[in-house]
Image: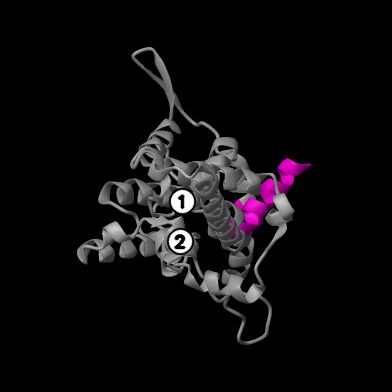
Amino acid sequence: MNGGPSGFNNAPVTRIIVIASALFTVVFGIQGRSRNLPWSYQDIFKKLQIWKLIVTVFGFSSTPELVFGIYLLYYFRVFERQIGSNKYTVFILFSVITSLLLEVLAQWLLKDPSLNILTSGPYGLIFASFVPFFFDIPVSTRFRVFRFNFSDKTFIYLAGLQLFLSSWRRSMLPGICGILAGSLYRLNVFRVRRVKFPEVIASFFSRLSWPSTGSTSPTRSSRNVLGSAPTYASRRAEANAPALLSTLLEPPEDSIGTLVSMGFDRNSARQALIHARNDINAATNILLESQGH
């Protein structure tokens, strides 16, 4: 199971999160300060080390956590492709802020010495993403191993479980808070799912995207220089125009694969891409609107 075509095509925000997580973890690890990444209630409210709130959102405490975390963040780019970079940024901010508030509240209420220091990393975003993963991503293949039933989604759950238990209670609490944050987003608390950033920010994210591959620029049509009746060659070109247009609009396989990975039927995905002139975001909207009727 994959999140569609490889790379960060149509997922610029995910690319920023992945790069930032890797950089923060590697830089603090090289400097031997990875032990300073985990944060506590006292660090924020008594020592006023606000910088730890920023660092803890990106940097992981250890290399194994980085490996599994980056893998999950990379896979969950499918949600950015599904709802767009604008709304996905809202999802990220809501998940991170809500999970941090829940972690602080849990530390204050529980007053458990083992929870004085929590592990760092984008746990809120990762485990909030498991909520739409559970509800919205369909199972495409099933298989059995020693009489146990598995699906292609099993590997994502196992990676999440490994990350969830990586630091025992210190990682379990952020994971639970992330799931709660994702549930609140799905319940549309405060109508957060309708929130969008201004178009200026949206256009900024669109400029961060890699240039789309596989697109063909239309060639200039020749005209009759003499202004007389169409020549034989021009009549042949006009007759072949529908077939040529159909060839130019034939969706690339990676775009079809992206929509299929979101759970749409292959033929419906192809027709939506043709109708949207290979604009994958417009095609996604067409498919979602057709499901709503």
Q: Residue at x 48, y 71 (%)?
A: 208
Q: Is residue 84 above or below residue 159?
A: below
Dividing the picture into quadrants, the one containing residue 131 is top right
CA–CA distance in space, label 1 to label 2: 9 Å
Camera-side mark, 1 or 2: 1
Of residues 278 and 77, the one nearer the viewer is 77
Q: What mark, if any, has residue 214 been given in the picture?
A: 2
Q: Find the magenta span and give its range.
A: 273-293
Sequence order check, earlier mark of 1 and 2: 2
Of residues 126 and 293, the one nearer the viewer is 126
Q: Residue at x 71, y 41 (%)?
A: 291
Q: Is residue 111 above or below residue 211?
A: above
Tell me where residue 137 appears, x and y as whole percent: 55, 38
Q: Is residue 225 above or below residue 123?
A: below
Q: Amino acid at mark 1?
A: Asp
Q: Residue at x 51, y 70 (%)?
A: 217
Check disc 1 and report its element: helix, strand or loop. helix
Q: Main secondary structure of the magenta part?
A: helix
Q: Quadrant of the N terminus?
A: top left
Q: Which residue is mark 1?
A: 254
Q: Quadrant of the C terminus?
A: top right
Crowd band around label 1 with a 10 angstrom C-alpha radius: few (<14), some (14–19), many (20+): some
